Amino acid sequence: MNIEQQINQLREELRQHNYNYYVLDAATISDYEFDMKLKELQALEESHPEFYDANSPTLRVGGEVTKNFDTVVHEYRMYSLDNSYSKEDLLDWETRIKKMVDGDVSYTCELKYDGASISLTYENGELLRAVTRGDGIQGDDVTTNVKTIKSVPLKLKGDYPPKFDIRGEIVLPYEGFAKMNQERIAAGEEPYANPRNTASGSLKLQDSSETAKRPLDCLLYNLVGDRLGISTQYESLEKARKWGFKVPQESHLAKSVDEVLEFVNLWDHKRRELPYETDGVVIKVNDLQQQEELGFTAKAPRWAMAYKFKAEQAVTRLNEITYQVGRTGAITPVANLEPVQLAGTTVKRASLHNADQIEKLDIREEDIVFVEKGGEIIPKIVGVDFTKRDKDSGPTQYITSCPECDTELIRKEGEAQHYCPNFQGCPPQIIGRIQHYISRKALDIEGLGGETVALLVKERLISNYADLYDLKKEQVIPLERMAEKSADNLIEGIEKSKDIPFERVLFGLGIRYVGETVAKKLARHYKSISAIIAATEEDLVNVDEIGIKIAQSVREFFDSEPNRLLVDRLIQFGVQLEISADKLANQTDTLNGQIFVVSGVFAKVSRTELKKLIEDNGGKVSSSISSKTTYVVAGENMGPSKLEKANKLGITIISEDDFLNLI
């Protein structure tokens, strides 16, 4: 046996032993024997660097240092999940599903692990990349650190697809977390707050050898890719296990919501026996073709739902109510609490939402309150222990002027929140709007973060987002923690932001109620900012999916002279405030006013590409057939009930080729 064969044999042996121990929990050799084989391989690799392998078992010990984590756009977006808390929620969800798909619907039930979401990309059976969830559109490349996690396979086995992504959670088991905290306390250091945050922070450590020391685990549950040769979610879990992934065994195939609830009730009690944190059950439509037909909303898949276990509660004292000012001027009251442990974290603050909520619960300073952390990240107060209230206590008087600039607050009819109208002179609004403008989903200005924005405003170098384009290197170099290279990156990042597409700039302007989706709709319809400015409220309401509330907000924004001056300055600086000629060339109004339902499997383009072609040519995609539907684009395996409904309503059914000819 030559040296290369010897190295490859050792690598394969170590991979198998690693899989047996960390995935199957069934070791076949002792730790000592494993370490001896690993040392033998390390010595051979050092002597023969020509046989280097980026996925060798020896690299799991870490050692590589990453100073800056690259941002990577997910090939397939990582969506959030909608939450449910009752049987009624699930039944409503099931009713919506059954209106949209044909045939019987079954569900895969999987435990919802509370960890750091991760997306792993495999190509030709080898780990290519590991990316954090980020904002769902893009995340950070943490491949070097993830390679140190022993349950993540670096090479797959069996009959796997040539390329795919697999999603899951990086978790820290209770036992490992407790041991880490014991070591920290013994060393005189502060203990970590909870396993989830510690797992997440571990992925961003600069030295991968430090990540390797932490007992992280990786639980995987969702395959993503084209033509994977899999027809159901349950099958995908079984296949992933065979390829070498650690897929939790606690999954169940249910035929009804009643069966789903049996699984939920079982694990609401048994979850305390598990080695990891869990906070609910994820229920997915099992059939992948039905999943495709159901599609996604702007934020979440229609085919999945998270059923959250009943929230934990804690009792503590409300010391003080303070008020925060958001970028839109919205005032949010905050309860400052006596610190209390809740669901693994120390809670010091809770949202009180608005004046109505304070009045409804009759919340007062010095009250003993019940705090809950359910589906929301920020804890909330759900009640008051009136038996412990001081008899001299008086009702909370909501503030009447802004805590930051002392401007009198306003509250519009029908709205829950109070607002500070001083958008030009109120510091948190100024900073918040600029931070929104530079955020990832908007202009994504490299080299410029929220803290730097606050510093630039404090030093009076900027007072709005248009001022960014006037900044000079010599102005920013004197700032705290700003070296020459940082200053260069900042100025270069601002310059590059002039190439960001119109719809993202429109979102970045911070118009109330104009989120990503609405910004795309408006950009697609009007093509330029000048056309939007010229549009009346009535014109705006006639745009697909734009209601009166959004239309009024858009008009209010552009009726403000300071806002129009800001936009004029952005145009002068060369920011993209119209759809580029290249993009316009790919868009037509051929399908304007036409509504399409897409059903079945297609040969020439994927369902996603087909929907994009419809939208790029001015059409609208709907998930269900109605009398308003113009065409049903039918692929292979189109459901019989959809076919029947289309025929009954006299809707024209066209093939994939018919559609491509249409455009």
Image (cartoon, rainbow, N blue to C red):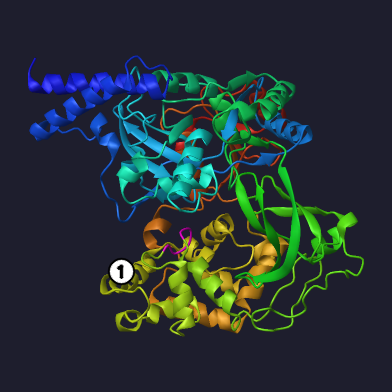
Q: In the rendered structure, does residue 323 fall within the stretch colored magenta?
A: no
Q: Is residue 389 visible?
A: yes
Residue sitting at x 71%, y 34%: 93
Position of 357 with respect to 37 (left or right) is: right
Toward which corner of the image does residue 498 lie, by quadrant? Answer: bottom left
* Residue stretch rendered in magenta on the structure: 440-444
Q: Is residue 277 above or below residue 480?
A: above
Return the x and y of residue 601 as percentages of the image width and height. 50, 26
Residue 525, placed above or below residue 468 = above
Q: Amino acid at mark 1?
A: Asn
Q: Quadrant of residue 145?
A: top left
Q: Nearer the viewer, residue 332 or 217?
A: 217
Find out whether residue 443 is within the magenta segment. yes
Q: Quadrant of the N terminus?
A: top left
Where is residue 386? Give x, y as percent. 89, 56
Q: Give left or right: position of 208 versus 413.
A: left
Taking the spot 34% from the left edge, 17% from the top edge, the residue there is 158
- Judging by the rendered image, the residue that carries numbered circle 1 is 489
Q: Residue at x 41, y 46 (%)?
A: 202
Label 1, secondary structure: give it: helix
Residue 470 located left or right of residue 237 = left
User: For the view shown, which residue lies furthest in the right direction?
Assistant: 391
Q: Where 627 falls versus 379 (above or below)? A: above
Q: Nearer the viewer, residue 468 or 293?
A: 468
